[in-house]
Image (spheres, rainbow, N blue to C red):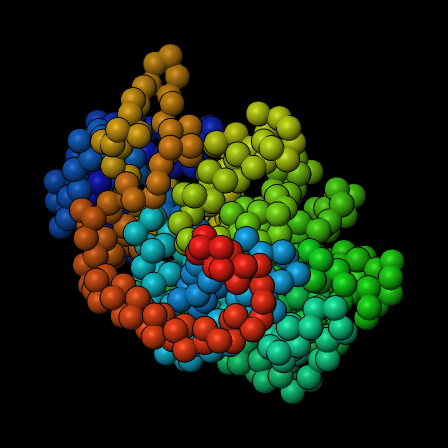
Amino acid sequence: MDIAIINTWLITFEGKGLGIIQNGGIGVENEKISFVGKMEDFNSYKKADLIIEGNNTHVTMPGLINGHTHSALTLCRGTANDLPEIEYIPKGLGIFASHLKAEDIILGTKLAVLEGLKTGTTTFTEYGIGLLDIVKKVFLPFKARVVATEMISELNFNEEKKPNELYTFYKYLGTNAFKRAIRLYKEFKNNDLISVMYGPNALDMVSMEMIKNVKNQAAVDGTKIHMHIAQGGRERVQITKRYGKNMTAIKLLKKNGLLDPRLIAAHIHDTTEAEREQLVKKGVKMVGCPSSISKIDGMIPPLASYIKLGGNAALGTDEAPGTGHHNLFNEIKMASILSKVAFKDPTAMPPWESMKLATISGANVLGLGTEIGSLSVGKNADIITINLHHAHLTPIIHKPFINLIANLVYSSKGNEVDNVIIAGKPIIIHGKFREIDEDLIVNKANKRAQDLFENISEDWEKAGSKMVSYHKQGYI
């Protein structure tokens, strides 16, 4: 046995309820889980190379699964806040993102993955440009599991600065991106840590012809399509200008035969319940990013609605300038609380349901449910432990019921994670990275961002966003 975690609470996400076991243990051998159960049945742990003692003050659970993230923009964290949705890209994020260089993308991704690992994420669904390079320079060295999704767009970045004018599609941009996506798939199709999906960006950023080509390729390769759908005002304006005033994202997808179980729809907050019901009936999966969408669009992702209709859903952190973080524990909490607000019902999205979104449900959405997302013998050993010995997680009771799940969802911060194991390899042990130099990455990111953005102050002020007004009033 390579690793044993002993004398711990287990949340297995198997069997009845969440499969909670008090005073349990888990064994890891050859990258797989070899034992899950009560300590009284776990005598072989004494032969393990590494023994992690839980002292019955820890929770051991599957690593968290981030279903949708844009790590590349993490150096832009805090640069676009409290803006009207229509201004967010053209007058906010776009000004900063357009100045990022290739090395800034890599550095920002390292920062995002660092934050994710520290807060218990073991699988990252990375959506961006140039993923082949990013996977090789970040995810492989960090030994993190990734679902790499190359963004396919026919839009020149400058077009987004004119959201009320019909965008021009440039076919060559989409063709080049599609070639990168195919190359990415071929490069990593046999890699155990890396999965690949195809990512036509959104209905306002890529032609219907290209989307259909992507769908055909995904079917040939046996993988999924991950797409931003029904994101709000900016997308709706473009769809009605291009396809007719009564057209919506869901109507357009249905008309073109694009609604099927291969599709993962990110966000969908600009949909009606009837449209969501259509998506569910067609087997479309959903990813919601509660913090980001509520902050950028002032809307609540319809996660609770989708689940109530019988759909499968996952959680994502989106991009750091929007959500402010890459901490899935925060998203688990926000999913539960915001769903209660949306339904005006305190029983909506109970904590056990929101935890599933970032574990077994998230794995199922990505097509990885037989490999990760729960603690079961034979599954990949993606495991985290959480130290419960904190004032804000106290008390933990087990009679007459267990309050553990509610405390983790509503009170945890993410920094209680102290051991992270991916594919049986220890990444963080007792709160310390085994191989990653955390301070070096943080210091480099701070210096680079300060130098980079100091030089675009004039462009930012000329854009005249509401943030400029906040700055002049001394608020930022």
Q: Which quadrant of the view contains residue 391? A: top left
Whether residue 307 is situated above or below residue 167 in the rendered picture: above
Q: Which residue is found at the position 30% from the left and 30% from the top? A: 392
Please tell me which residue lies in front, 406 or 27.
Answer: 406
Rendered location of residue 455, percent (x, y): 41, 78
Foreground residue, 189 or 281?
A: 281
Q: Give the x, y percent position of residue 118.
A: 30, 52
Which residue occupies 34% across, 14% down?
A: 399
Q: Is residue 441 left or right of residue 135?
A: left
Is residue 218 toward the left or the right of residue 67 in the image? Answer: right
Residue 212: x percent and y percent? 72, 72
461, 392: nearer the viewer: 461
138 with respect to 271 (left or right) = left
State whether residue 133 is above or below residue 247. Answer: below
Q: Is residue 351 visible?
A: yes
Q: How many marks?
A: 0
The image shows residue 149 at horizontal and vertical percentages of: 52, 68
Residue 219 appears in the rendering: no
Q: Quadrant of residue 200?
A: bottom right
- At x 47% / y 28%, what residue is drawn? 17
Please give the name of the residue rendered at 42% of the width and 53% of the height, measured from the top-left corner. 325
